[in-house]
Image (tube, rainbow, N blue to C red):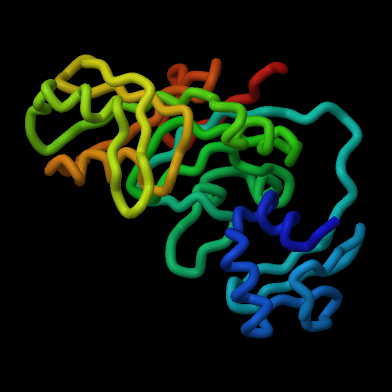
Amino acid sequence: MLLRNLLQTQYGLPRRTITSLIDQDQLFVNEKKVENYKAEVHIWDKISIPSLHLQFQVKEEKSDSPSLLAFNKPKGYTCSKSDPHNPTFYELLPPEFRQEYYYIGRLDKESRGLMLLTSDPHMVHAFEHPSKEILKTYLVKLDRPFDWQLKTRILKGIEEGGELLRTKKLEKSDFWLLKITLNEGKKRHIRRIFKTLGYEVLDLQRISIGNYVLWKLTEGEYKKIEL
């Protein structure tokens, strides 16, 4: 398998970060410096990234059925298996999760709510590939009352930073919250939409991914989903 694919699916490292690690001589396989962007790894190879304090061994994929977990991420935790500057949500889970489970549906540090985790990297692709257009729903608290005359503008798409930020649905929810549904997820997608319109997002909580919902999970709690 390609080393970069392994690091992307298992540890959430962006391709740009992996390329930078290679350029800076910070990526090693079996204690040998990686110099090829298309380097391959095999079962039992030892991978180390000193700058991220990350070291692990490539394991054989399990033959039993993959499990799917629902997790309620609190604010203040990043979606990464290794972050030298911030706590990661994996620190709230049993140690074996860091090695064996990949996350579906990244949330930024200041956002909270539903994340899915799976032991099958192919399931990550099935959920996150843009062609799947899986709906994700969020509750949004703004710094002031929302002007509903802007709803049509949001549903047409907001241009920001050279990208078109699309929204599938926008509704009122309880306690003056907005409920917003997307079928894509660009970086800080919702926050950028409202910032462009002059609002600040005070709280952002994801409550569903496809058919899976947050249920009554407390923050930091997880549960197994029967497939």
Q: Height in image: 227 above or below 128?
A: above
Left or right side of 91 for 47: right
Rendered image quadrant of residue 102: top right
Q: Nearer the viewer, residue 184 or 79?
A: 184
Left or right side of 79 for 24: right
Q: Nearer the viewer, residue 9 or 16?
A: 16
Assign the C terminus to one quadrant of the image. top right
Rendered image quadrant of residue 176: top left
Instruction: From the top left corner, tell me how far across and down residue 119 is, in percent.
Output: 74, 38
Left or right side of 113 for 92: right
Instruction: From the top left corner, tell me how far across and down residue 54 is, in percent.
Output: 66, 68
Instruction: From the top left corner, tell me how far across and down residue 14 is, in percent.
Output: 58, 59
Left or right side of 147 for 33: right
State how many labels appear: 0
Q: Height in image: 165 above or below 19?
A: above
Residue at (67% x, 74% y) in the render: 49
Residue at (32% x, 54% y) in the render: 161
Q: Height in image: 152 above or below 193?
A: above
Q: Nearer the viewer, residue 164 or 67?
A: 164
Residue at (21% x, 39% y) in the render: 194
Residue at (63% x, 76% y) in the render: 21
Assign the N terminus to one quadrant of the image. bottom right
